[in-house]
Image (cartoon, rainbow, N blue to C red):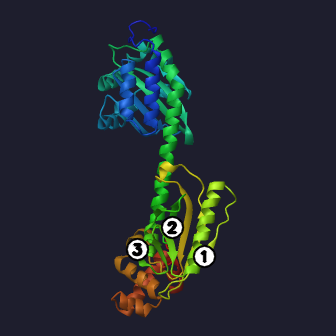
Amino acid sequence: MEPGVGVWAAGMLDRDQHNDLIARVYASALGQASWVDTMRCVSNAFHSSASLCQIADSSFRYVIQENHGYSRDFAEWYYASEAFANDPRPPYFRSVRPGSIYYDHALFDVDEMYRNPIVRESCDILGVSYQLGMVVPLPNQHLGTFTLLSTEEEGHASHEAIEAFQRLLPHVEQALSLGHTLQFGAAKEAVLLDALAHKADGVIMLARGGAPTFMNDTASRILASGDGLSLTAGALRTARAPETRRLQNLIGAALETWLTDAKPPGGQILITRPSGRRPYVVRVMPAPPGPSYLLGSTAACVLHIHDLGAVRVPAPDTLHSVFGLSEREADLAIELVRCANLQTAAANARMALNTARNHLQSIFRKTGVSSQAEAVQLFSTGF
């Protein structure tokens, strides 16, 4: 069937409608509007019943998808169903060159295809028959699709609808690329911050004005203890005035470097502790400029705090999941890290010395070490 005969009467979008849809697409990419609401507006403008927006990897596995016209549960069920798996049309859609639009009658003989009972079954399940879509290239070798779905009554795309959809293509491509980049960056940032939060050493990020904008749990505990390093009136201070001045000078230089984009000077300082415990080594570095939305306030300076006196004790669940140690073996391993003496470790773990020796041999087998010293060194790495 040729376009223009029994087709939906979308007509050509006027300038205001075109600009409104563009604005909505970019607002969704920036997280300022729901993609579902934007898809509803596009569907309404083209008089189609439903629409679909998907992000797929290079193997056409869908990693993100939103739709207008169906519930999310229904969509997930359909794409996992035999009807979809056996439908002969998806390979045609996947063959579309990125950066172009597609529609049914441009890909295959519509009348012949819809005589296929599997195709009719899919159409009956979805309640729609025709598609007008676009495929756009995205960063990280991903592909994006934006598809309008129409019923038998609405018909397939008219020449006017195809032309109007073609004019939207570059804007949808840019918006999806922008949204994909922001989402990917935010995901990487979330993973990074989660890793920092669990890191054994302290990490503090300072905003361009010098105020802390992030610190992990270890850094928070170090500052809360007040043993040589503290946060007073929004500024980092030490127990000794000369060390405070040097630390603040290093921070000031790092902030100035970040603003001028000069060569990072870096710097380290030894912070003594009133308790008499081993000191902290604090490394101060300017942070590379980055988008401020990821942290709410751009990190301009990073401080890494290494506690020379810290004993890095592994978590019992980590010993179990990584090495397969039993509960009692994990208890002994932790006490060995704390005191490095089997007899004392056994007493602290409330087990007989002979029992501890048996557990120690089991620990050797499970971890691949051959001595108590190697085991202590392995468990003290802060993994």
| Residue type, label 3 | Ala
Farthest residue, direction top: 5
User: Residue 72 location, x and y as percent?
Assistant: 32, 37
Q: Residue at x 49, y 35 (%)?
A: 176
Residue picked out by circle 1: 269
Instruction: Indicate the position of residue 295 as horizontal and vertical percent values.
Output: 47, 54
First in sequence: mark 1 or mark 2?
A: 2
Label 2 element class: strand
Identify residue type, mark 2: Val
Please tell me whether mark 1 or mark 2 is closer to you in this view: 1
Quarter of the image with the N terminus is top left
**Residue 12 seen:** yes
In this rendering, the answer to whether 36 lies above or below 127 is below
Choose the circle earlier in sequence order: 3 or 1. Answer: 1
Instruction: Name the residue: 43% across, 29% down.
Output: 24
**Label 2 belongs to which residue?**
203
Q: Vertically, is 353 above or below 242? A: below
On the image, the x and y values in percent for residue 380 come to 50, 78
Residue 201 visible in the current orientation: no
Q: Which residue is mark 3?
A: 315
Do callouts 3 and 1 mark residues in contact (Cβ within 8 Å)? no
The alpha-carbon separation of the residues under discs 3 and 1 comes to 30 Å
Measure the C-alpha gap from mark 1 to mark 2. 15 Å
Are circles 1 and 2 on residues that touch, CB within 8 Å? no
Q: Nearer the viewer, residue 56 or 211?
A: 211
Q: Residue at x 66, y 55 (%)?
A: 260
Other residues around mark 1 within 10 Å, as few (<14) / some (14–19) / many (≥20):
some
Which amino acid does the dot numbered 1 rest on? Ile
Asked if labels 2 and 3 touch by Cβ distance under 8 angstroms, the answer is: no
